[in-house]
Image (tube, rainbow, N blue to C red):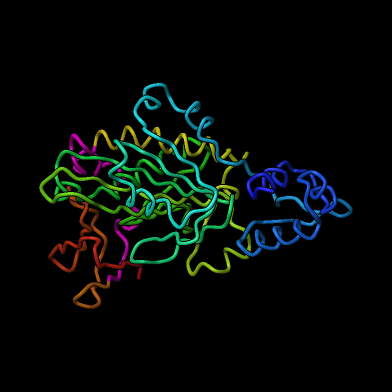
Amino acid sequence: MQTRDLVAALADGHGWSGSELARRFGVTRAAVWKRLDELREAGLPLQAVAGRGYRLELPLELLDAAVIREALPEAARARFGEVAVHWDIDSTSSELLRTAAAHGDLAVCLAEQQSAGRGRRGRRWQSPPLCNIYLSVLKRFARGMGSLAGLSLAVGVAVAQALERCGAPALALKWPNDVLAGDGKLAGILVELGGEFLGPCHAVIGIGVNVYLPAAVRAAIDQPVADLAAICAPLPSRNRVVAALLAELADVLDRFDAEGFAGLSAAFLQRDRLLGQALTLTDANGLQHGIGAGVDVRGALLLRQGDTIARFDSAEVTVRRA
């Protein structure tokens, strides 16, 4: 009994009893219950159906590389390399970082669940099975790492545009890597670089999107969060969301490659949640206070402090509204 096959049965919207699942997969009921307990422990949102057994709390589609490719615009379809879908992996970004030498431009790695998903500054990214999108893309650049300032902000523009195309209402961006619906974090971005400072180099762009957050997962997150299930009607399929993300990324990354962040700074500022807000920053020099004044053409956060404007990069800075 493959875990993916078991989850596919539970995702069809009908209730399945342990006996039915055991007959379907040719195993004992004890084996079924053990696997279900493992999935529940991992965060899969199982629901008991009176007299029928179990099903997912809402229908969630398994990721399918062929379906994703078919949903891409033809021009984008030709651009992307391998689209790999894993059932369980430590981290989609870690996988691409490990195997970067074997991939060409725009290789894609997806997972149904991650055991060691991570966000900025080493924070853990909650990755329950089947609920969300865990996506990483390998992008190669002829120029060096020094030319990639502001890349996470540019990717934020692409993610917001893609999710809005899938039915999300107007989204905001919080420097340097959060996509917000209202005050809740809907998606996060983590960019990790490899190669030469003067070129060539590559970026592994990790994107996590909350499609459906079960109550137990929400309780484990220490900040306001949002998911597509709460803001989109109807809920778009995960394959459609992935295709929209990849299509927008292809366009935005081409523009970034040609113009740097300067060509996308206006699009970021239109969504900048911190602009004009009283902010508190923490960096190597301690606490900093001021008013958000946007970002510069390299993606540094601008903070108005009296008559001066201070600039902060994203390496070791945390920021919150005062």
Q: Residue furthest right?
A: 51
Q: Residue 72, position in %: x, y?
A: 45, 28
At a point 14% along the width and 41% down the height, the residue shown is: 143
* Front residue (pair 192, 267): 192
Give yes or no for residue 49 being in the magenta stretch: no
| Left or right of 238 on screen, residue 75 | left
Give the camera-side residue of 319 and 61.
61
Seen in the image, is 226 located left or right of residue 195? Answer: right
Residue drawn at (42%, 51%) of the image: 92
Residue toward you, 157 or 198: 198
Q: Position of residue 113 (x, y in %)?
A: 53, 53
Residue at image position (47%, 66%) is: 223
Magenta residues span: 256-281
Seen as rendered, the residue at the extreme bottom is: 286
Instruction: Indicate whether 287 appears above or below 312.
Output: below
Among the 4 quarters of the image, the one containing residue 286 = bottom left
262 part of magenta stretch: yes
Most extreme residue toward the left is 198
The location of residue 210, given as percent across then percent down, is 52, 52
- For the C terminus, the quadrant is bottom left
Disc tally is 0
Could you say where residue 31 lies in the image, as x and y percent from the top left? 75, 58
| Residue 176, placed above or below residue 279 | above
For this view, does 254 lie left or right of residue 127? Answer: left
